[in-house]
Image (cartoon, rainbow, N blue to C red):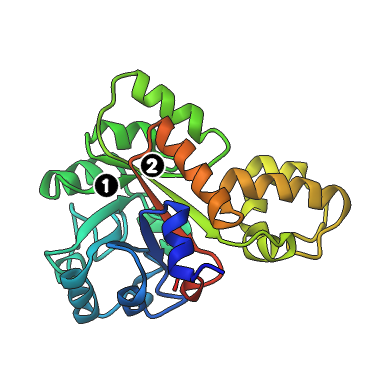
Amino acid sequence: MLSAEARVRESGIDAVALKPLECDVAVASDLPFDTVVVDYEGREHLPDPAVLADLAAARDLRITVPVRASGFDPLGDDSIAATLPDAAGRVFVAGHSAYLDDAECEKRVAPRLGAAVETNPDAWVGTEGIERLALATGAGQFELLSRSTDRDLRALRAAGYDGHVSLYAPVVLADDEDAVLDAVGAYAARRGPVRRALPDGAATDGTASGRAREVLSAAVRDYALVGDAETVGERVAELKAAGADTVVGYPARGPAAFR
């Protein structure tokens, strides 16, 4: 049986994304990835700057920065952003409404992305919901895996875009369907097409049955990377052939699954 590290290598995943609400991001030092992305889950969960600095010294670290959030706003209060290590790269995003108050949600995204990229030209820009704005910055793109990703990447490259494209996806290195649905069934169920296709009140985890299980089993393969390492590796190769440069995997069952 392959070790967890060997399975990760076979999967072809290039980088790991960690959520500080779920784990101590210092665990990245024990994972077989040179590139680490730390997600933003609210100011109260931002890792200590010293922890981030240590990680940036050991890995190619990127930190997700919501440009509308107070403390990170390049056109306003950027006091928290100023504490982030200079050695860490940035992934600029508009910011999820779950982590923003009403005033922050009303802020204009475009000028803030422009200002942020101007001072951090090597940043990636998260594109979900702001695809045109992200492209307009000229920065590397940070896309979320979806059912249209292959087609979108090919169109982007055919149109002449030659910048860096990073692709983010939850990962479950397992072929047990119950385990897969337990890990990413609810995640896939939040996507509009999946939500509309599911029967009302249906379970979205490994207990799903009938029509709900059929929908979810297909959906998790559209919105996540699932299966044994070889299967995931084949899917990653397809995505890279379509135009992705870097595949960033979020370990949906926790970082221990990657070591």
- Secondary structure, mark 1, is strand
Residue 192 in which image quadrant: top right
Q: Nearer the viewer, residue 138 or 60?
A: 60
Does residue 38 appear anywhere in the picture? yes
Q: Nearer the viewer, residue 227 or 108?
A: 227
Confirm or deny contact between disc 1 and disc 2 (CB under 8 A). Answer: no
Q: Nearer the viewer, residue 85 or 164?
A: 164
- Residue positioned 15% across, 69% down in the render: 85
What amino acid is at disc 2? Thr
Which residue lies under the disc numbered 1? Answer: 124
Q: Report the mark closest to the observer, 1 or 2.
A: 1
Q: Quadrant of the C terminus?
A: bottom left
Which residue lies under the disc numbered 2? Answer: 127
Residue 88 in which image quadrant: bottom left
- Secondary structure, mark 2, is loop
Q: Is residue 87 above or below residue 259?
A: above
Marking on residue 59: none
- Could you tell me residue 40's position as x and y percent? 37, 64
Number of labelled discs?
Answer: 2
Does residue 96 appear anywhere in the picture? no
- Could you tell me residue 156's position as x and y percent? 37, 25
- Could you tell me residue 201's position as x and y percent? 82, 57
Q: Quadrant of the N terminus?
A: bottom right
> Of all residues shown, which one is farthest toward the front?
1
